[in-house]
Amino acid sequence: MGYFRDNIEQVKGYEPGFQPKQTDVLKLNTNENPYPPSPAVMKVLAEINAEQLRRYPDPTGDEFRQAAAQVHGVSPDNIMCCNGGDELLTIALRAFCDEDRPAAYPVPTYSLYPVLANLQNCEVMELPFDSEFNLPPKLAAAGAALTIVCNPNAPSATFIGVDEMASLADELDGVLLIDEAYVDFAEDNCIRLVKDFDNVIILRSMSKGYSLAGLRFGYAIAQPPLIASLMKLKDSYNVDAVAVALAAAAIKDQKYFAENVEKVKKDRERLTEHLRELKFEVPAGYANFVLAKSKERKAGEIYDKLVERNIYVRYFDLPGLSDKLRITVGTSEQNDKLISALKEILSG
Ligand SMILES: Cc1ncc(COP(=O)(O)O)c(C=O)c1O
């Protein structure tokens, strides 16, 4: 075509997990929470009025910032609301990276990072994790303007300890963005690093732990000067009035959130055990999905046979991942259905 900038012409856009139109499928491919959002969210949704829609929303979503600040023990000035955690990634790449300012991250990881970096036309340094998903030793020395660590990592579900992340933040000259989209299902998190490091940005998502993937709401936590500058890059009204009201209701209901997270974690352990019984190799996971390595059959073949049964998991035909399946933790019943199908496929 020739209309676009060269790097845009060359970028292969992000490929989201398949969203089947039918409803009679078992969908364990995009890490959604199997439980509905809090009843408090549904109540606020039912009470949305015309006036809230007629007017422009609060540009900074302060109702949510205040609620989230209280939950995390920080100030509202430490928080920026985003249209999904993905918007924060876009903003960070635009803020810190260009032709002379590279991005770095360990791989394999969230496949959106290289797409956004290519759109920004910055150099990308992809440093491989070792086989146990430990941080690449040369990450700090790579000298990136923006280093991203997904923690827990997708798709491995592994977790890097907070002390190690603190050392990395300390060694880096540039910014460290810690993508905590899945941290609600882990045992610890890196929010406390924000107090000590002016170069740390934490990404949070309301899509997983709070069952609001359809709403599109995420947020950044960082020191106030960083937040204030990041705000310059966002759309004026990047989070809409309905999203702010619903996300605030969700984060205020910590009891419902904690109960759901516990259910998912319990089912994750059960699913892991059952997969191991079927001779899959499954590392200890700290997210709402597991990465299962098939030793008996090709992962792609198992994926196809699951699709024939209307069961969707995620298969990445990529280096280091092509022998594995990423499986979202569903309800106990959904996980049992998957395990029965796998038993049938592996014995066939
Ligand atoms: C690793 C990771 N980071 C960030 C996100 C962004 O989440 P959202 O934009 O739904 O808040 C996702 C979504 O799947 C993810 O997997």
Image (cartoon, grey):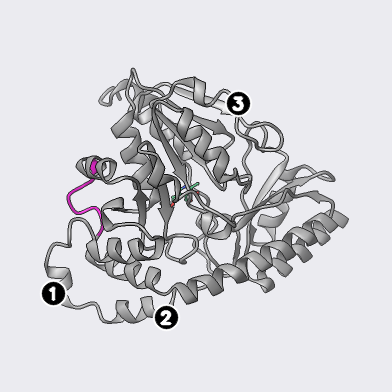
Seen in the picture, residue 263 relative to 326 is either above or below; the reply is below
Which residue is tagged 1?
Answer: 51
Quadrant in the rendering for residue 341: bottom right
Seen in the picture, residue 101 relative to 169 is either above or below; the reply is above
Q: Secondary structure at mark 2?
A: helix
Q: Quadrant of the N terminus?
A: top left
Q: Residue at x 25, y 41 (%)?
A: 225
Q: Which residue reaches farthest front?
A: 196
Q: Please indicate, yes or no, whether residue 348 appears anywhere in the rendered image.
A: no
Seen in the picture, residue 285 relative to 259 is either above or below; the reply is above
Q: Which residue reaches farthest right?
A: 347
For discs 2 and 1, the disc positioned in front in the rendered view? 2
Q: What amino acid type should be assigned to the residue bearing mark 3?
A: Pro
Q: Is residue 11 left or right of residue 257?
A: left
State the image coordinates of residue 348 (x, y, percent, origin top left): 86, 55
Q: Residue at x 13, y 62 (%)?
A: 56
* Dot 2 or dot 1, earlier in sequence: 2
State the image coordinates of residue 57 (x, y, percent, origin top left): 17, 62
Q: Is residue 294 left or right of residue 151?
A: right
Q: Residue at x 43, y 24 (%)?
A: 144
Give whichever of 58, 24 is nearer the camera: 58
Q: What amino acid type should be assigned to the residue bearing mark 2?
A: Pro
Which residue is tagged 2?
Answer: 39
Q: Please indicate, yes or no, whether residue 326 appears anywhere in the rendered image.
A: yes
State the image coordinates of residue 137 (x, y, percent, origin top left): 60, 26
Which residue is tagged 3?
Answer: 137
Residue interval drawn in magenta: 233-239
Calculate the distance from the C-alpha at mark 3 to the C-alpha at mark 1: 54 Å
Q: Tell me the chief SS of the magenta region.
A: loop
